[in-house]
Image (tube, rainbow, N blue to C red):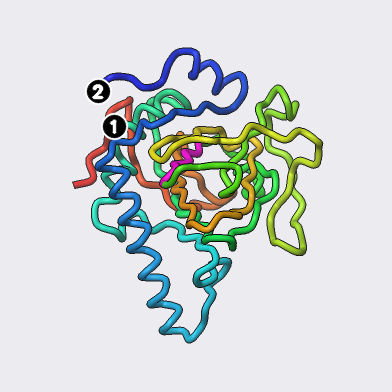
Amino acid sequence: MISVISEQQRRQYVDEGYFILERVIPESHLQILRDSCDHLIDLMHQEMDRLGTDHIHISHRGKRYHIAKQYDKPPRLAEYVFSPLMAEVCRATIGETAYLFYDQYVVKAAEQGIKFSWHQDSGYLDFSHAPYVTVWAAVDDMTVENGTAYVLPFSKSGIRSRVEHIRDPETGDKVGYFGDEPGIPGIVPAGSLIVFSSLTFHRSGANTTDRMRRAYVTQYSPQPIRQPGTDQLLHLGVPFLKDGRKVSHD
């Protein structure tokens, strides 16, 4: 496989906490991401119908969907999650050993999706841990108008470590940055990746368009993340790479 990550991007990840790769997801995998999103939304609707409700947790029918830790439910989604492209991203960011820590579809429906505040992904963990990498995949073309993700480089935030976040009582978001920096918007075509550290502040805007906006997020850690003082695994801890080579999932 030809490398899609340059040495400059590797250095940028270390220095600024992120890099962007445009149009790197193979078309076949992009179709898998779209089909899988439809599949998981259908399953969520079925569960809503069973429960007699239009919302589950922070997912609301026809408005927004957050569907987490379901990578093994849709047919073939794991092909993307454990793909050569994801392996290259992990090697370029967290090293030769990687575990799938978390995955989530974030869907903002037309003129319904709300914005998310500045936060570090590590800010949602209330204990010290090795930083992990977030891979934010654009399933649709991303614009400011449809609520793309923004990243805040380390040089702008001045922060390279996990900080305590404050819960917004109105949205439930955790917020960790209160400065005036606007951040860098990921204005990218479908099939692109925004790759950033769990220590990098990021946010997203509201979807003000008349079309759905879909993103798929995978996170990989250099070691399983466990609850402090216990052997209890937090979220997922699926082996992916060992000594730089893919672990079999057959």
Q: How crowded is mark 2: few (under 14 residues within 10 Å), some or many (20 or more)?
A: few
* Left or right relative to 6: residue 39: left
Q: What residue is drawn where x is 36% and y is 27%?
A: 88
Q: Is mark 2 on a helix, strand or loop?
A: loop
Above or below residue 184? Residue 225 is below
Q: Residue pushed farthest bottom?
A: 52
* Left or right relative to 242: residue 234: right
Q: Residue pushed farthest right?
A: 179
Q: In terms of image quadrants, where is residue 196?
A: top right
Mark 1: amino acid: Pro
Which secondary structure is most common in the magenta stretch? strand
**Residue closest to the eye, 195 or 27:** 27
Which residue, given by chain and number where applicable, does mark 2 sit on?
Answer: 1
Q: What stretch is highlighted in magenta?
A: 133-139
Residue 93 got which mark?
Answer: none
Coordinates of residue 231 in the picture (x, y in percent): 49, 51
Q: What residue is drawn where x is 41% and y is 74%?
A: 45
Q: Are marks 1 and 2 in contact (CB under 8 Å)?
A: yes
Q: Quarter of the image for the N terminus: give it.
A: top left
Is residue 111 one of those drawn in magenta? no
Coordinates of residue 215 in the picture (x, y in percent): 46, 48
CA distance separating discs 1 and 2:
8 Å
**Residue closest to the eye, 98 or 167:** 167
Q: What residue is drawn where x is 41% and y is 29%?
A: 89
Q: Residues within 10 Å of mark 1 (few under 14, many from 20)?
A: some
